């Protein structure tokens, strides 16, 4: 289902517009990330979709139908909603929490039971062990998992997530990102996901919408945004997290790299990432620091140790340097000064970079 | 044991009569008080501007000494069980009102927001989320009201409403220690028992997920 | 028989005086127990339970039973007020002390203060507003109970109410009841104001 914003403005009484003249179409089955500094209007944008806030001007449509045409409660029952504070009802068990919307929709008991089992299985949580626990008896990561499952419970086509992993420790956060990515690959929901963490946005988003003081300033795929920030604001927003200079004219390592990681799996505090154009997998710790490379075979065999010792290169290493190394390898991890893995140079990414240089735009 | 037996055989008919009068006074005023104050508390929790005024007024009213309250009401309403019930009813409102209001206001706004976002109607929200979470505090308010009422109902004897106060005041007036004990001990027992009952109910209505380990 | 304004005034002073003595005595007990027991949760729970039980005791029943021990006069009333006065101060002092940020205590200790000095210079000043709130609740209750002290032979405004009731004289009755109500409300408002002043700092 598509969600379309047409010239939407929201003004809270006595304040500057929280969202101003927003035009945006969220495509069916995509995960769109809304990102920007605190107070830029992300939450407001999200909450207008399920009518927790009403726009001051403009209209919002779902599959072409104005959302004001729906009955408020019915609209909301058809849209999943997850928030940072989990919002789990402390007086309800895990099962009761997940079942809230199915109950509102008057699903019969066995259908609800089956649904809870199915959902818990999706995140590898044992029904017998967890279904009858109370939120208090779960870890932060488990609570947020249940929060996500709850928003999926009635199988809504659209899901709104407001910084769902924002309050988690880095390890749990990355684990949940991986799970969400897997769920999404399977379920193909239309997800609108708010975050203020650019790493999270790049990892999860099919597209990213960057907001600044109520305005949408850039919309595009993660690569587009990292490579071609439209203005100083976007550039500095990304730079804050990557700590390298993109506006420098001479090419650096990162300009040649692909940055579109896909979380694949997590093991304790280690995370395995994959990236387009490389058969290998990349192992990082909870702070995204590079540990090593693992071959596909070893990952399949559950051998989670770095098996290739590839010397990573720095984000600002020069092209000459890189090309001299690249003769002997197929892929080259790129790390920043904190040894964080920020990209991988592959033949594919090199070709893209060349194409950009020659053609002046991205293929 | 002997002494208790002696008191019982001497005063049993008076004790039983006083007990029923006391239960009647406390019971009626408590039930009426709850019927008025709990819905009012719910209403106020949605109208916070008004609530600030009402709660302030109500807290000030509550500071008025019980005997003074009876004395101020007496010239207006006269004596007997009915004026006593009115005073008791008025006084019982306050703790229940305050606790209902505070209980509902202290429900985490995120939960209310999420309940709304999931498509609960405001009535469903009230029943399944807000009241459920505020229940322990509301019961605590009922307990407090009951304890006050037992104490106040004893004073109601002064305006001719009967109850254990009859025995206590007669005992004091006549320097009759037996009568004092016969009045005071059951009054205290009644307060303790009521307190215990509501403490148990409170534990029962506390959602398992919120009970202390 | 008529009651003059100065009669009412002096009865009000007696009333306040008796209430204050009882409240201070009870509050002192509550305060000391809370301070000494602040690191002994078990013992404190026992005291809190007892204090709570006392609170549940209907006031006229309490006065009547104490009368058997202490006889007619102010003593019975003051003992009752002291008993009721333990709980609010005990609980608030304890809660206030538990709410002090442990880091501040560490900092105090780190600067070389002894435990006593930390208590005096850090913990108690931070807890003071809570203690004051407990004292206010306790004093207002005391003023209320003091009105029925007349039945066990103590002085104060209850005297007029009692006489009025006996002689079925509304005026005398109100001359006790209204000042008693005003006194309670004034104490509530004034100490409440002081609390808010302190909170602002
Ligand atoms: N309910 C509200 N009432 C008034 N102002 C609000 C409300 N919610 C948000 N705002 C204001 O709107 C702006 C955008 O807020 P929000 O959408 O929450 O931003 P974000 O989620 O990006 O941090 C902020 O200036 C915020 O103060
Ligand atoms: Mg937000």
Image (cartoon, coloured by chain):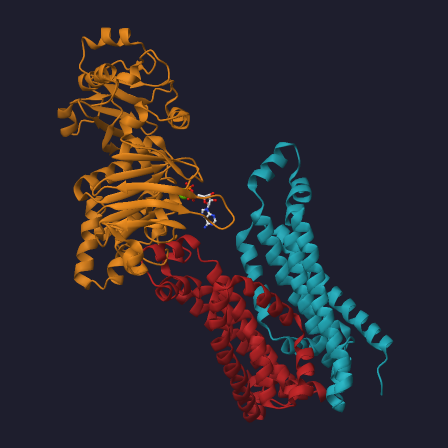
Chain colours: A orange, B red, C cyan
User: Is A275 above or below relative to C156?
Assistant: above
Using the rendered image of the protein, determine whether residue B179 is visible from the camera's viewpoint: no
Q: Which residue is at 44% across, 63% downward?
A: B134
Residue nearer the viewer, A228 or A264: A228
Choose top left, top right, bottom left or bottom right for residue C31. Answer: bottom right
Q: Horizontally, is B201 left or right of B59 in the view?
A: left
Q: Is residue B60 above or below residue A134?
A: below
Q: Quarter of the image holding residue A256?
A: top left
Residue A135 horizontal/vertical position (percent): 34, 51
Of the pair A294 and C124, the residue shown nearer to us: A294
Q: Which of B196 and B79 is in front in this view?
A: B79
Residue ID at (40%, 66%):
B205
Relative to residue C190, is residue B157 depicted above or below?
Answer: below
Q: Position of residue A286 (x, y in %)?
A: 33, 30
Q: Which part of the image, by quadrant, shows the N terminus of chain C? A: bottom right
Image quadrant in which you'd find residue A212? top left
Residue A196 seen in render: yes
Q: Residue at x 68, y 42 (%)?
A: C121
């Amino acid at each position: 289902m598509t969600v379309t914003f047409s010239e939407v403005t929201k003004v809270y009484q006595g304040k500057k517009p929280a969202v101003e003249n927003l035009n945006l179409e969220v495509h069916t089955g995509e995960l769109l990330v809304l990102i920007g500094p605190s107070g830029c209007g992300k939450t407001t944008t999200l909450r207008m979709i399920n009518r927790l806030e009403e726009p001051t001007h403009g209209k919002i449509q779902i599959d072409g139908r104005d959302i004001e045409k729906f009955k408020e409660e019915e609209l909301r029952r058809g849209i999943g909603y997850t928030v940072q504070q989990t919002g789990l009802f402390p007086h309800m068990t895990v099962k009761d929490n997940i079942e809230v919307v199915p109950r509102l929709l008057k699903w019969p008991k066995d259908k609800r039971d089956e649904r809870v089992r199915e959902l818990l299985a999706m995140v590898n949580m044992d029904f017998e062990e967890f279904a009858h626990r109370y939120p208090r008896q779960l870890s932060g990561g488990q609570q947020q998992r249940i929060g996500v499952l709850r928003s999926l419970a009635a199988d809504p086509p659209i899901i709104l997530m407001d910084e769902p992993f924002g309050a988690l420790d880095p390890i749990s956060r990355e684990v949940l990102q991986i799970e969400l990515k897997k769920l999404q690959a399977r379920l193909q929901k239309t997800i609108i996901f708010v975050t203020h963490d650019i790493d999270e946005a790049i990892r999860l988003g099919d597209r990213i919408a960057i907001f600044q003081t109520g305005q949408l300033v850039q919309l595009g795929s993660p690569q587009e945004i990292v490579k071609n920030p439209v203005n100083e604001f976007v550039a500095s927003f990304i730079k804050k997290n990557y700590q390298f200079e993109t506006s420098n004219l001479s090419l650096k390592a990162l300009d040649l790299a692909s940055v579109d990681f896909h979380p694949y799996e997590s093991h304790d505090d280690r995370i395995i990432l994959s990236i387009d154009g490389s058969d290998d997998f990349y192992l990082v710790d909870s702070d995204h620091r590079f540990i090593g490379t693992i071959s596909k075979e070893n990952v399949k065999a559950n051998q989670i140790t770095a098996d290739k010792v590839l010397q990573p290169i720095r984000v600002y290493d020069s092209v000459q340097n890189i090309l001299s190394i690249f003769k002997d390898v197929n892929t080259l991890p790129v790390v920043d000064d904190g040894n964080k893995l920020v990209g991988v140079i592959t033949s594919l990414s090199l070709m893209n970079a060349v194409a950009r240089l020659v053609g002046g735009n991205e293929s | 044991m002997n002494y208790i037996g002696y008191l019982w055989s001497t005063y049993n008919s008076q004790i039983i009569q006083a007990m029923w009068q006391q239960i009647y006074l406390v019971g009626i005023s408590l039930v009426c008080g709850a019927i008025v104050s709990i819905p009012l508390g719910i209403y106020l929790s949605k109208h916070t501007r008004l609530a600030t005024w009402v709660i302030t007024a109500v807290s000030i009213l509550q500071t008025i000494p019980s005997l003074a309250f009876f004395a101020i009401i007496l010239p207006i309403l006269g004596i007997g069980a009915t004026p006593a019930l009115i005073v008791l009813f008025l006084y019982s409102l306050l703790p229940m009102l305050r606790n209902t209001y505070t209980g509902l206001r202290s429900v985490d706004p995120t939960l209310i927001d999420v309940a709304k976002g999931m498509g609960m109607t405001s009535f469903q929200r009230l029943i399944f989320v807000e009241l459920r979470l505020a229940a322990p505090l509301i019961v605590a308010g009922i307990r407090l009201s009951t304890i006050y009422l037992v104490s106040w109902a004893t004073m109601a004897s002064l305006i001719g409403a009967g109850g254990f106060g009859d025995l206590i005041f007669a005992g004091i007036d006549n320097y009759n220690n037996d009568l004092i004990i016969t009045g005071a001990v059951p009054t205290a027992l009644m307060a303790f028992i009521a307190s215990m009952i509501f403490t148990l109910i409170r534990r029962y209505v506390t959602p398992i997920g919120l009970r202390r380990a | 028989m008529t009651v003059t304004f100065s009669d009412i005034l002096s009865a009000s002073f007696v009333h306040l005086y008796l209430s204050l003595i009882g409240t201070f005595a009870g509050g002192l007990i509550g305060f000391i127990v809370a301070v000494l027991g602040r690191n002994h949760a078990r013992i404190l729970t026992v005291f809190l339970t007892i204090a709570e039980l006392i609170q549940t005791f209907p006031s006229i029943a309490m006065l009547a039973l104490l009368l058997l021990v202490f006889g007619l006069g102010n003593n019975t009333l003051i003992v009752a007020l002291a008993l009721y006065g333990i709980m609010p101060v005990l609980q608030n002092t304890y809660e206030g002390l538990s709410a002090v940020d442990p880091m501040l205590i560490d900092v105090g200790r780190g600067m070389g203060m002894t435990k006593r000095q930390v208590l005096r210079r850090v913990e108690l000043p931070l807890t003071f507003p809570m203690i004051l709130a407990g004292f206010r609740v306790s004093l207002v209750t005391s003023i209320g109970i003091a009105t029925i002290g007349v039945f066990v032979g103590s002085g104060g405004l209850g005297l007029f109410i009692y006489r009025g009731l006996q002689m079925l004289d509304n005026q005398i009755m109100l001359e006790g009841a209204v000042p008693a109500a005003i006194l309670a409300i004034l104490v509530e408002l004034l100490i409440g104001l002081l609390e808010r002043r302190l909170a602002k700092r």
